[in-house]
Image (cartoon, rainbow, N blue to C red):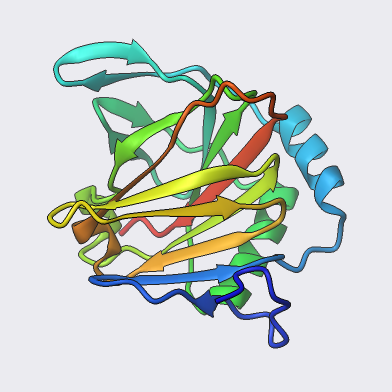
Amino acid sequence: MDLFAPAADLKPIPIPIRDGELAFLPQLPLPWPNEEVLARLITETDWREESVVVYGKRHLQPRLSAWHGEKGYRYSGLSLAPLPFTPLLDTIRRAAEEATGRRYNSVLLNYYRDGRDSMGMHSDDEPELGLEPAIASVSFGATRPFILRHKLTKETLKLPLTDGSLLFMAGQMQANWMHGINKTAKPTGPRLNLTFRNIV
């Protein structure tokens, strides 16, 4: 399957996967070029370097982050108080809702400044996300491989998340799969990822 073929109906293209729902849209329709969105998000966001608890030890996250939405969020010993949606974030959210047919009341932004920034393997399975979370992951900037690993079979899938793309995860994805972004020694530019979700 060609993940980067044009989507004529502007809906995500289903990706066959066991024990979950996964779909990919090469370009989320927005009223601005991707490079303008990237630049504005970098300058307009109140970025924070948070610390999280991993296996009982507190570590600084290897990336910057921000939380916007209607409700707070907790993960890995970290409590995030929400900032309101900005007009830019609200426009991206509405585009993601139109593409996926779901509603989102919150977004986690992650800023990968270069190849040294990463995201450890994890599942977005916190109770406040509900039993079958629907997550729309929108990327801007440098392409980074998104790694998916099945919790039982250890089957691994790598998806290059390109500039302006949307990856949709739903159903039993978070119950059965982990995902993350590895570090890389290759020269790479900045990347922003926005994961829209609904806090219940």
Q: Is residue 50 left or right of residue 74?
A: right
Q: 21 above or below 37?
A: below
Q: 117 above or below 193?
A: above
| Residue 67 place in picture, x, y as percent | 50, 37
Q: Quadrant of residue 61?
A: top left
| Residue 69 place in picture, x, y as percent | 50, 48
Residue drawn at (48%, 74%) of the image: 102
Residue drawn at (71%, 65%) of the image: 27
Residue 3 or 21: which is nearer the viewer? 3
| Residue 199 place in picture, x, y as percent | 35, 55
The number of numbered badges drawn on the structure is 0
Residue 166 or 126: which is nearer the viewer? 166
Q: Quadrant of the N terminus?
A: bottom right
Q: 6 above or below 42?
A: below
Residue drawn at (26%, 67%) of the image: 132
Residue drawn at (63%, 49%) of the image: 139
Residue 80 or 175: which is nearer the viewer? 175
| Residue 189 place in picture, x, y as percent | 72, 29
Q: Quadrant of the C terminus?
A: bottom left
Q: Quadrant of residue 176?
A: bottom left
Q: Quadrant of residue 93?
A: bottom right
Q: Is residue 42 left or right of residue 57?
A: right
